[in-house]
Image (spheres, rainbow, N blue to C red):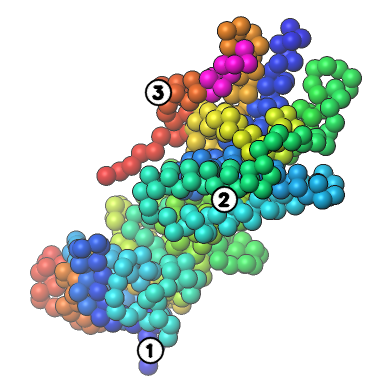
């Protein structure tokens, strides 16, 4: 029996007067990969931002028995939730290695931090080669790897990924998703993945939720979702 | 020629005061993107604290260190209590708040210590250094203290984790929060440090301009000129800008007869206007490009 690490219930969110989420319910299993699929503007990014306390919201978000609603972003991150945001959130003026160090800002043990930086370099060797380069000058793919690396430096229990494939070449995407699968298995990090590229996401994830205009319209194991006629027509394109 | 060198050195000495104040302005500007008009008054008030401590019998360097600690705490306090609630307020709210702070601090200082001019001691003495008349001991001390402070700040921001966190919080607050940095406290820390730097500038300039509630008025204008010249977003630029303003002011005052002592302050204002018109990003600043 797997344990639920994140449980979202009746989540409503709005930007000013514009309501974006109208009662979203879903959960993420510990140690698994869950994906949230949907078209542009369905509310995927907003859902992730809501989990990290970055939008005004109502409802309940339980992380391992702790209510996240009402907590500040910093407090939520310190509970062990790392967010790779839309647009990657690179500290462009700083070097790649400083970006990784910033990821570990909530941790104290400098020896462990140094070891973890080496571990990230082992996953993404290109980052080692670029470690003293200004992060803003890295390519899109390298910056995405840096963003994932920065998130892992937190030693998170839950990793939120917002469209990691966005703007990357297919080869780079394949490499990145391979590494994400490894990270999920080796480090026992639970992943909540938001993607527009549904076939990519369904191959990595073991569980999927489909979101349309701010509501969850379908959910189930990835294998079942993949076979569903309407999903195939609308999102997989074959 | 000797007069020229002498004036350049004297310019560097006053310039290092402007550099400190410019640095304080830039530190706060980077954190909240507003210029703190009350920076000079905060420095003046701290200098009065130092004077009061010495009146009570504390030796200079003891009072110096206590004053820096007081200024730091006061800076953090002002940010937490007054500026934090204004976090998302429009520019004008900030401007009005800073002007109010300016007037309040000025009046309170006048109320406590009155507006009479008070002599302020220098720890370095007034004798010419090494018997030459090139540079006075106080000027040399001013430059030395400034350089030590700059070296300390450089090391702090470049090599410490908290320095890295402060840079991250200023450069990209959203991402900084997502790695767990308490951005609000970093801003408060920036205020504390800016106030501490300002207090050092106040204590170093007070022996020259004498202590009174309005002593920082013109200094702040020069510091603005230095900060604008350096580009507002660059701490190194602010320091260099401050030094340049100090030297230019001194040379123009000495060698251009019309300017003399009377029109010196005008030079600072001319520099501000000229930079804003021809090179708004300053010598070392970057122009901020906003994607819409």
**Residue placed at 70% from the left, 53% from the top?**
B69
Are discs 3 and 1 less than 8 Å apart at CB?
Answer: no
Q: Along the line of sight, which residue is nearer the eye, B33 or A55?
A: B33
**Residue placed at 61% from the left, 61% from the top?**
A114
How far from the left and from the top, in percent, is residue A17?
20, 63
In this rendering, position of residue B174 left or right of residue B105: left
Q: Along the line of sight, which residue is nearer the eye, A61 or A193?
A: A61
Relative vertical location of residue A119 with respect to residue B155 in this rendering, above or below:
below
Labels 1, 2: front one: 2
**Residue placed at 44% from the left, 62% from the top?**
B178
Q: Which residue is mark 1?
A: A2
Relative vertical location of residue B203 with respect to residue A163 in this rendering, above or below:
above
Where residue B277 is drawn, which disc sits there?
A: 3
Where residue A156 is drawn, which disc sits there?
A: none
Whether residue B194 is visible, yes or no, is no
The quarter of the image holding the N terminus of chain B is: top right
Q: In which quadrant of the rendered view does residue A225 lie?
A: bottom left
Q: Earlier in the sequence, mark 2 or mark 3?
A: 2
In this rendering, position of residue B187 left or right of residue B161: left
Asked if residue B253 is among those painted magenta in the image, a careful observer would answer: no
Question: Distance between the Cα atoms at labels 1 and 2?
Answer: 48 Å
Q: Which residues are magenta?
A: B260-268
Q: In which quadrant of the rendered view does residue B61 lie?
A: top right
Of all chains, the one bearing label 2 is B
Are discs 2 and 3 less than 8 Å apart at CB?
Answer: no
On whether disc 1 and disc 2 are found on a single subunit, the reply is: no
Question: Distance between the Cα atoms at labels 2 and 3?
Answer: 29 Å
Q: Which residue is mark 2?
A: B191
How far from the left and from the top, in percent, is residue B128?
85, 22
Of all chains, the one bearing label 3 is B
């Amino acid at each position: 029996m797997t344990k639920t690490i994140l449980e979202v219930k009746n989540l409503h969110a709005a930007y000013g007067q514009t309501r974006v989420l109208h009662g979203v319910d879903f959960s993420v299993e510990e140690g698994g990969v869950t994906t949230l699929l949907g078209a542009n503007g369905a509310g995927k990014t907003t859902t992730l931002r809501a989990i990290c306390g970055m939008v005004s919201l109502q409802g309940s978000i339980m992380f391992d028995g702790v209510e996240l609603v009402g907590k500040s972003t910093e407090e939520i991150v310190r509970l062990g939730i790392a967010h790779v945001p839309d647009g990657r959130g690179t500290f462009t003026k700083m070097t790649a290695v400083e970006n990784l160090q910033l990821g570990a800002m909530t941790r104290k043990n400098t020896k462990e931090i140094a070891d973890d930086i080496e571990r990230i370099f082992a996953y993404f060797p290109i980052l080692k080669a670029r470690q003293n380069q200004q992060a803003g000058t890295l390519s899109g793919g390298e910056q995405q790897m840096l963003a994932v690396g920065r998130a892992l430096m937190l030693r998170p229990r839950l990793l939120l990924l917002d469209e990691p494939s966005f703007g990357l070449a297919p080869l780079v995407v394949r490499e990145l998703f391979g590494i994400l699968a490894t990270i999920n298995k080796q480090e026992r990090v639970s992943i909540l993945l938001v993607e527009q590229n549904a076939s990519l996401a369904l191959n990595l994830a073991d569980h999927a939720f489909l979101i349309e205009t701010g509501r969850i319209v379908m959910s189930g194991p990835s294998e079942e979702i993949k076979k569903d006629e309407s999903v195939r027509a609308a999102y997989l394109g074959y | 020629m000797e007069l020229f060198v002498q004036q350049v050195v004297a310019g560097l000495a006053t310039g290092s005061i402007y550099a400190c104040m410019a640095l304080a302005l830039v530190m706060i500007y980077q954190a909240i993107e507003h210029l703190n008009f009350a920076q000079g008054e905060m420095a003046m008030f701290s200098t009065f604290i130092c004077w009061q401590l010495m009146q009570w019998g504390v030796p200079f360097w003891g009072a110096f260190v206590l004053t820096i600690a007081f200024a730091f705490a006061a800076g953090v306090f002002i940010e937490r209590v007054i500026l934090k609630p204004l976090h998302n307020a429009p520019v004008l709210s900030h401007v009005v708040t800073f002007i109010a702070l300016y007037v309040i601090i000025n009046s309170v200082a006048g109320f406590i210590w009155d507006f009479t001019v008070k002599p302020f001691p220098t720890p370095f003495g007034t004798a010419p250094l090494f018997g030459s008349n090139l540079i006075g001991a106080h000027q040399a001390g001013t430059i030395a203290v400034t350089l030590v402070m700059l070296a300390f700040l450089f090391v702090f921001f470049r090599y410490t984790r908290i320095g890295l966190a402060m840079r991250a919080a200023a450069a990209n607050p959203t991402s900084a929060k997502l790695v767990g940095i308490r951005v609000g406290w970093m801003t408060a820390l920036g205020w504390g440090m800016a106030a501490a730097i300002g207090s050092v500038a106040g204590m170093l300039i007070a022996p020259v301009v004498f202590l009174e509630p309005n002593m920082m008025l013109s200094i702040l204008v020069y510091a603005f000129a230095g900060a604008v010249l350096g580009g507002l977003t660059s701490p190194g630029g602010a320091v260099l800008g401050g030094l340049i303003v100090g030297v230019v002011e001194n040379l123009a005052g000495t060698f251009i007869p019309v300017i003399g002592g009377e029109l010196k302050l005008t030079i600072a204002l001319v520099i501000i206007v000229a930079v804003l018109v021809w090179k708004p990003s300053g010598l070392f600043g970057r122009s901020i490009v906003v994607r819409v």
